[in-house]
């Protein structure tokens, strides 16, 4: 799409083939680049179609339109499209809670759940979570290259129900989103329904009560829930990954609401994730990546062999060699460590032993992303192929409560990487933590 835009900017006609289900997405991209009238040709080939006859039949239907688009000179309006700009007012609506939520919902600014109104007072309170000025640019976020200023992040954090103590984590997460190494520009709007998964390490976990025990990814903890929800709102409202417009997730993903957890550093026999990735132990940091699948695995035994077997025999061939986060409970980690397993040895074991017969692997059929690498395509259907050829794509953290399940968060594509970002705290951090320390749920037993 952007290549065609660049050509038309030189007054040359193009014909961009766009699947009929993606016409809105293409209009958004072309308008963003100042070419709202980019010549597109709708085509009806089913997405990722591998049946040659169906491809040819549907492409033939579009060829006349392609020829017409390429041979007709650009009009003056196409050469010099009118540019529209609307400067938004700082106060966009006044009303009660219900009226504000309905207004925001109609404007497409929410996630379908009630929002906290981002009043001037609420945003000012949120900004206590950082010493950065409100207009400080944290990053520019794809796909619509929205400018993520501190104040805009604070607005979305308020809407998500976050506390000022959560803002440093949100800012760090947005820095990762702006880092091209994370792949957010693709993950945020692809058909694969990827969702940001944030692992928090360091002292801040306990200071703001991020859950890393029972139900770490379940509803109930304001820090986990609100931080993840704020990141999701930022992806939509600032980055511009809007459902059905730029975010073209086929099935969608409930993890897009929120997916934040801490690592149980005290319960782990190994170095925590942020230390493995270059931070000091006393640092607080976030590690972010974009899985689109989550499995709870039952190990084949509670000894080291049973735990590892439960992992290698449950890796899904369709998600082979993709970014994968294994979440072990503290007892499982202790068992493995007592038997001499460290994280790197576990990763090596998985990469060398997780395999499947070729006929169960997408590469055998030659139709999936990456299939162009014929060297990886086996000839014999019964030959085994490895599922984790690059052990660096596998990370291991310790979290969870009593029980024997293993968590596996994985991607069905390899378009980015795990990225870790240190969290910066405001000068008055300790007093801010004290201000909100008593906000704790108490359940009647």
Image (tube, grey):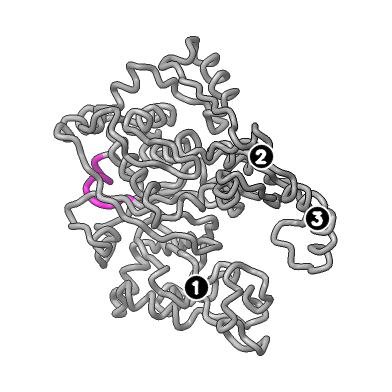
Indicate which disc, 1 or 3, sits on the residue closer to the N terminus.
Answer: 3
Position of residue 334 relative to residue 69, above or below, is below
| Helix, strand or loop at mark 3 | helix
Q: Which residue is mark 1?
A: 310
Question: Which of 319/364 is in front?
Answer: 364
Question: Which of 396/118 is in front?
Answer: 118
Position of residue 336 relative to residue 202, above or below, is below
C-alpha distance separating marks 1 and 3: 51 Å
236 left or right of 76 in image:
left
Q: Which residue is mark 3?
A: 63
C-alpha distance separating marks 1 and 2: 43 Å
Residues tagged 1 and 2 counted as in contact (Cβ below 8 A) = no
| Helix, strand or loop at mark 2 | helix
| Helix, strand or loop at mark 1 | helix
Q: Dot 3: within a 10 Å radius of its alpha carbon, few (fewer than 14), some, or many (20 or more) residues?
A: some
Question: Which of 440/239 is in front?
Answer: 239
The residue lying furthest to the top in this view is 95
227 left or right of 321 in image:
left
The residue that appears at 83% across and 67% down in the rendered structure is 53
| Residue 388 on image: x %, y % | 48, 75
C-alpha distance separating marks 3 and 2: 21 Å
Q: Which residues lie in the magenta part?
A: 200-207
| Residue 82 on image: x %, y % | 58, 28
157 left or right of 29 in image:
left
Q: Which mark is residue 24?
A: 2
Position of residue 182 relative to residue 37, above or below, is below
């Amino acid at each position: 799409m952007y290549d065609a835009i660049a050509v038309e900017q030189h007054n040359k006609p193009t014909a961009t083939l766009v699947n009929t289900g993606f016409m809105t997405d293409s209009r958004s991209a072309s308008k963003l680049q100042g070419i709202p009238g980019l010549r597109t040709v709708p085509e009806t080939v089913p997405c990722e179609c591998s049946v040659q006859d169906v491809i040819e039949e549907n492409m033939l239907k579009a060829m006349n339109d392609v020829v017409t688009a390429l041979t007709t000179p650009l009009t003056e309006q196409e050469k010099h499209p009118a540019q529209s700009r609307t400067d938004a007012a700082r106060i966009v609506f006044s009303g009660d809670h219900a009226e504000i939520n309905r207004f925001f919902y109609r404007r497409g600014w929410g996630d379908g759940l009630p929002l906290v109104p981002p009043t001037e007072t609420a945003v000012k309170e949120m900004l206590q979570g950082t010493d950065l000025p409100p207009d400080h640019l944290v990053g520019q976020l794809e796909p619509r290259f929205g400018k993520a200023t501190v104040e805009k992040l604070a607005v979305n954090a308020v809407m998500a129900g976050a506390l000022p103590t959560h803002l440093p984590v949100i800012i760090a997460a947005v820095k990762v989103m702006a880092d091209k190494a994370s792949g957010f520009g693709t993950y945020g709007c692809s058909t694969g329904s990827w969702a940001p998964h944030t692992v928090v390490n360091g002292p801040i976990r306990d200071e703001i009560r991020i859950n890393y025990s029972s139900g770490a990814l379940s509803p109930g903890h304001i820090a986990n829930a609100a931080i993840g929800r704020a990141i999701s709102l930022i992806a939509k409202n600032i980055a511009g990954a809007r459902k059905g417009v730029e975010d073209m997730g086929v099935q969608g993903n409930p993890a897009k609401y929120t997916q934040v957890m801490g690592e149980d550093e005290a319960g782990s026999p190994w170095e925590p994730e942020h230390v493995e990735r270059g931070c000091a132990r006393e640092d607080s940091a976030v590690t972010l990546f974009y899985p689109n699948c989550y499995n709870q695995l039952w190990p084949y035994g509670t000894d080291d062999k049973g735990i590892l077997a439960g992992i290698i025999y449950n890796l899904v061939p369709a998600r082979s060699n993709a970014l994968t986060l294994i979440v072990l409970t503290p007892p499982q980690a202790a068992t493995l460590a007592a038997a001499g397993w460290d994280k790197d040895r576990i990763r090596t074991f998985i990469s060398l032993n997780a395999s499947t017969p070729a006929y169960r692997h997408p590469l055998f059929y030659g139709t999936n992303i990456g299939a162009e690498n014929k060297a990886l395509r086996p000839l014999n259907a019964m030959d085994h192929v490895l599922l984790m050829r690059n052990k660096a794509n596998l990370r291991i953290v310790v979290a969870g409560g009593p029980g024997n399940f293993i968590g596996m968060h994985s991607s069905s594509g390899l378009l980015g990487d795990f990225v870790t970002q240190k969290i910066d705290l405001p000068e008055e951090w300790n007093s801010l933590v004290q201000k909100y320390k008593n906000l704790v749920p108490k359940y009647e037993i």
